[in-house]
Amino acid sequence: GAVVSQHPSRVICKSGTSVKIECRSLDFQATTMFWYRQFPKQSLMLMATSNEGSKATYEQGVEKDKFLINHASLTLSTLTVTSAHPEDSSFYICSANLGARTDTQYFGPGTRLTVL
Amino acid sequence: DQQVKQNSPSLSVQEGRISILNCDYTNSMFDYFLWYKKYPAEGPTFLISISSIKDKNEDGRFTVFLNKSAKHLSLHIVPSQPGDSAVYFCAASAPGTYKYIFGTGTRLKVLA
């Protein structure tokens, strides 16, 4: 199957700093990528849909100025958590699909963010 | 409002027996459903999908059943193996969108 990577896998940062997480599709081009957040023992919550060459579409309740998304190329989307606070600590996962809506979404391995 | 629900947070099954994981949804517009498996600190991996034009899809040990009138789907794993122990998420999608709505997950433990 298609491979999606994320970097870093773990990051610990101080409150008030910004953290960038990269999501790459390694063997396919993804016009659309998705960013999810998972709290412990909870579902994956879709944060935003990242579209190559255009602005991301954010889900209701997700602050776009807090979670900056850039999809600069067909293989790379980045999520920047700005001015991070302890409540932003979570597991962030990206996914990408191959094109058609019913194509499988391939998920990255996730990034564990801990804000001290 | 949780549009996709997995009411059983956990399930334990003996190795070799059948595992049945259930998922209910409220949005009648959903027409495509998937099951994902997830290990701790990893991203979900795709297992099996089903379109609303079908009521069953089978792939090896995994079978997904869809009951549209009841807005219910289930994943059957038979025979269950210890390596199947993971959290299983169902997800649903509606026409015109790439978005998947995920359930809260069921932790399956297969006992050797």
Image (cartoon, grey):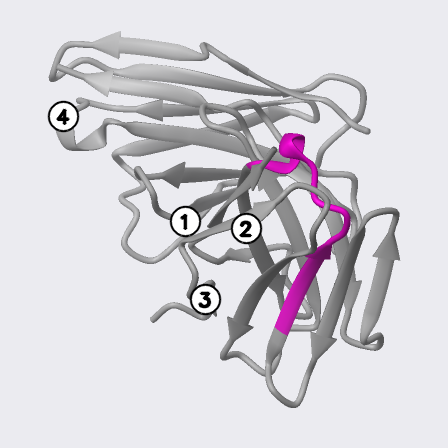
Q: Amino acid at mark 3?
A: Lys
**Residue B31 horizontal/vertical position (percent):** 70, 72
- Asked if badge 2 and badge 3 are on a common chain, one would say yes
Q: Amino acid at mark 2?
A: Phe
Chain letter of the residue carrying label 2: B
Residue extending farthest to the bottom is B69
Chain letter of the residue carrying label 3: B
Q: Residues within 10 Å of mark 4 (few under 14, many from 20)?
A: some
Q: Amino acid at mark 1?
A: Ser
**Residue B58 horizontal/vertical position (percent):** 86, 58
Q: Which residue is mark 4?
A: A85
Residue B84 within the magenta-colored segment of the rendering: yes
Which label belongs to residue A43?
1
The answer to whether the residues at label 1 and label 3 have Cβ atoms under 8 Å apart is no
The answer to whether the residues at label 2 and label 1 have Cβ atoms under 8 Å apart is yes
Q: Which residue is mark 3?
A: B5
Q: Is A79 drawn above or below residue A45 in the view shown?
A: above
Q: Residues within 10 Å of mark 1 (few under 14, many from 20)?
A: many
SS type, badge 2: strand
At a point 42% along the width and 66% down the height, the residue shown is: B7
SS type, badge 4: loop
Q: CA distance from mark 2 to mark 1?
A: 8 Å
Chain letter of the residue carrying label 1: A
Q: CA distance from mark 1 to mark 3?
A: 10 Å
Q: Which residue is mark 2?
A: B89
